[in-house]
Amino acid sequence: MAIKIPVMNNAQRHLRPSIQSLAGSQIREVVNSALDQTSILKFWFGESDEVTHPAVREAAIASLQAGETFYAANLGLFELREAVAAYMARLHGSLANLIDVNRIAITSGGVSGLMLATQSIVDAGDEVVCVTPIWPNLPQQARIMGARVQAVSLYAEAGEWKLNMHALCEAITPATKLLLINAPNNPTGWTLTRCEQQMILDHCRTTGTWIVADEVYERLYYEPMEAGNLNGGINHPHGCAPSFLDIALPEDRLIVTHSFSKSFLMTGWRLGWLVVPPSCLDALGKLIEFNTSCAPSFVQRAALEALKREAEITPPLVAHFKRCRDTLIPLLQALPHVQVRAAKGGMYAFFKIEGFDDSLALAKRLVAEAKLGLAPGCAFELTPNGAAGGWMRWCFASQDVARLTQGVLQLRQWLEKQ
């Protein structure tokens, strides 16, 4: 007699609704449409094509050869936490805002740090406000936690992106648990001013709202230091973008997220850090235990070497990226019907071509017809009709500036055929 095995329902239908409804990456959708094409000029991902400094790689090798293959402390190697604290204190510390090892947690990448910050604050049903366009991982992490996410959009004026402070403060009420904000911004390059930061911090103090500030691009900043930003004791022309840490108190409801990825050329190493109120550090260590347990020791040794060599890694990198930006932007501005302005920070040109409002379709056409790989602006919006939906992101962090010139040539030739 045959045994009947019951047919199970599709398992996916029994996942949490918030997980089932997560949108896939539209950047990956464009990339996947061209996986087998080797002739494409690729500017779609947010990383440089330059490899990590040799001494940093050697530090990781030395750690492995020394046998550092075991679990590390949840919060990270104490030496690295001390070094990160000293680095942040040099940039942003003051007598009113002491940044020491008791505020630093090492995380397995900046994205893990953002998830930890969100998990530590947000419960299901909480209200979260997010300034968009923004890297999609931030609002999606809040949605994973079951939060209701409301977008306050930047707006473009002659290609330059700006924030309506009145609209943002209206959106943040005592019911708002968390504000997610990324500046310098991915994808637009928009950067908060000191005045805007102070207004946001003061307002969130009034409403009791937490701020999670994604400041991973703060060193990729191309403007002179703002007057009043007196904490930037770094010895090169541009310093860093204004930070909430410059004006906050240690126990403010503020978590600042950072990463070794962008300004230390370590995207694939997956290492970041959080600056948190001192009273929150122990709880965060427990949360790290239940997420990743710890970051690998050999990766942390590499990061320690990167911090020791910061002066020879980051300032030349910023100077080169500025050259890349200042090469690409005029070439794009010379194209017909293009809106674009030079970003103050970050590693992206964010531009719009009049007559092309569907950026995902445009990105796929540029891959297929112009052999040019860019990221669609719609990937950085919460809704299909967001302000950035018709825009394109071009990562200009190219070791070879000539690649940028060639990319614009291919775009020009494609536009001439339309």
Image (cartoon, helix red, strand yellow):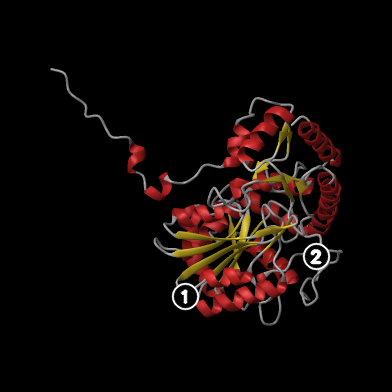
Residue 417: quadrant of the picture? top right
Quadrant assignment for the N terminus = top left
Q: In the image, what residue type sits under mark 2?
A: Gly
Distance from disc 1 to disc 2, alpha carbons, whole Å, reads 35 Å
Task: Decide if residue 95 is in sight here.
Answer: yes
Q: With respect to residue 38, does 262 lie above or below?
A: below
User: Is residue 238 toward the left or the right of residue 154 in the image?
Assistant: right
Q: Element at badge 2? A: loop
Q: Nearer the viewer, mark 1 or mark 2?
A: 1
Q: Position of residue 399 (x, y in %)?
A: 82, 42
Q: In the image, what residue type sits under mark 1?
A: Pro
Q: How many tags in the picture?
A: 2
Residue lying at 63% horizontally and 56% vertically, measured from the top left: 272
Q: Which residue is mark 2?
A: 239
Residue 331: quadrant of the picture? top right
Q: Which residue is mark 1?
A: 174
